[in-house]
Every structure is written in C-alpha cells, then in structure tokens.
Image (spheres, rainbow, N blue to C red):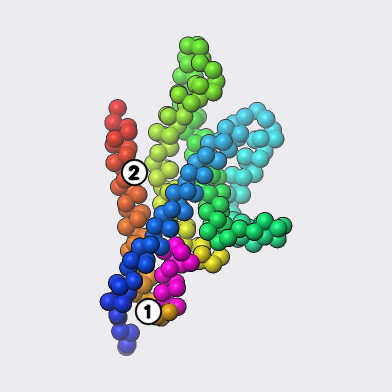
Amino acid sequence: MLDYTFHWRPALRALPEMLSGALVTLEIAVLSMILGTIAGVLLALARQSGNRLLSGFATGWIELARNTPALLQVYMAYFGLGSIGIFLDSYLSVLLGIAFNNAGYLAETFRGAMRAIPHTQVRAARSLGMGSAKAFRLIVLPQMFRIAFYPMTNQMVWAILMTSIGVIVGLDTDLTGVTQELNVRTFRTFEYFAIAAVLYYLIAKLVTVSARLMAWRLFRY
C-alpha cells in the first residue's frame, strides 16, 4: 500500500527560492554557451589550419570533450586543478567544465557549417579586395551561425540540464542545489524534485521557443 502523504503547500511556498536557483542555472548555461561558442570557433579554425600543433591541440580538446563524461570534466576542474594548486569554487568549476564540453561539440558543428559554405563565396570576397580576416567576419561567420543555429539551441538545452551535476561538487545555489537543500531540511523528496523537474522543463521550452522566434526574425530572408 502507498502510505506516502503528499504535502504540496510547503513545497509551493519554497517556489521563490527555487526560482532564484533556476536563474543561477540559466546564468551558468548562458555563460558556458558564450565561452563555448568563442572557444568552439577558435577550435574549428585551428582544426582546419595547416599548423600541426594547432590542429593537434584542437583535435585533442574535441576528442576529450566528446568522449569523456561531462561529470569527469567538472571533477577535473574542481579536484584536478586543485591538486596542482589552482583552486576553483564549485560555481566556476561547473561553468568551466560545461564550457569545455560545449566547445568540443560546437567546434565540430561549426567546422561542418563552414565546410557547407561554398568556397567560391570566399574567393569572390577576396577578389573584391577583402582580406582573409574580413572575408571570414563578413561572409563566413554569419552563414556559419545561421547553419549551426539549431544545433546550438540543442546544445544550450543540454547545458541547462547539465548544470544539475554541480551538486556533486557542492554547488548549492542552482536549481538542483537549492532543491537538494530543501529536500534535506524537509524530506519531502517527491514534491520538491517534481517542482524542479517542471522548472527545468519550462526553462528548456522557453529556450526552444525563444530560439524559434529568433530564427524567424533573423532568417526570414
């Protein structure tokens, strides 16, 4: 027989506290995407360069990011760097761990997007007197982001969900961390984590819908 009695009222009273944690979750995800996007573009360029050192470095980063668990990457930022005297708090460790992972996946997305752009466009830009850097900035980069926009949206949703692993390294200010603290104080596990699941779902749907609206606004023509 199920003898668990649900108490939703105390859980709902904690909603403002959980919403505050949800904002931290979104903040980490957004910052990790910004860092991951910047690093991903640089890695994609390095991977395509003729420089063996740069290409090898980029390949190593991408292979590690894509073929090892994200939790391990957060552990390395939190515990691994600490073992060599570089101490990061849980917030920064989660941010850098997820950004490292984002960069690896986005680098391959960007590389594929760049290869989809006809090289004749770059040659045409160079024939008009543009330098290689200007041609990349004005011709390649906008088209690359357009092609990669929807995969980037998926990566953003992934980053939001992966912030939950921060509780493993002591992060208690994000949505999962706040929910866990409430659970420890009240032992109302189902109620609090059910609300957290709904909030994660709503955040992910908000990102998806916002991305569709942005795509409609930016890519109508």
Look at the numbered disc 1 and give the secondary structure of its residue.
loop
Look at the numbered disc 2 and give the secondary structure of its residue.
helix
The residue drawn where x is 40% and y is 80% is 186
Res. 116 visible in picture? no
Q: Which residue is mark 2?
A: 211
Please provide percent x and percent y for residue 151: 42, 43
Q: Quadrant of residue 60?
A: top right
Judge left or right: residue 202 versus residue 144: left
Please provide percent x and percent y for residue 117: 46, 26
Q: Sort mark 2 into few (<14), some (14-19) or many (20+) by Cα contacts within 10 Å.
A: some
Between 80 and 48, the one lying in front of the other is 80
The residue drawn where x is 67% and y is 56% is 86
Q: Is 139 placed above or below 64 here?
A: above
Res. 210 visible in picture? yes
Q: Is 191 placed above or below 39 here?
A: below
The C terminus, quarter of image: top left
Q: Amino acid at mark 2?
A: Ala
Please provide percent x and percent y for residue 10: 31, 77
Query: Disc 2 to disc 1, how far (Cα)?
Result: 35 Å
Q: Amino acid at mark 1?
A: Arg
Task: Determine the main secondary structure of the stretch shown in magenta.
Answer: helix
Q: Which residues are magenta?
A: 172-184
Residue 176 belongs to magenta span: yes
The residue drawn where x is 39% and y is 76% is 189
Q: Sort mark 1 into few (<14), some (14-19) or many (20+) by Cα contacts within 10 Å.
A: some
Between 220 and 175, the one lying in front of the other is 175
The residue drawn where x is 29% and y is 35% is 217
Would you say the residues marked 2 and 1 are in contact, meaning their CB atoms lie under 8 Å apart?
no
Instruction: Count up the numbered dots.
Output: 2
Q: Which residue is mark 1?
A: 188
Residue 138 belongs to magenta span: no
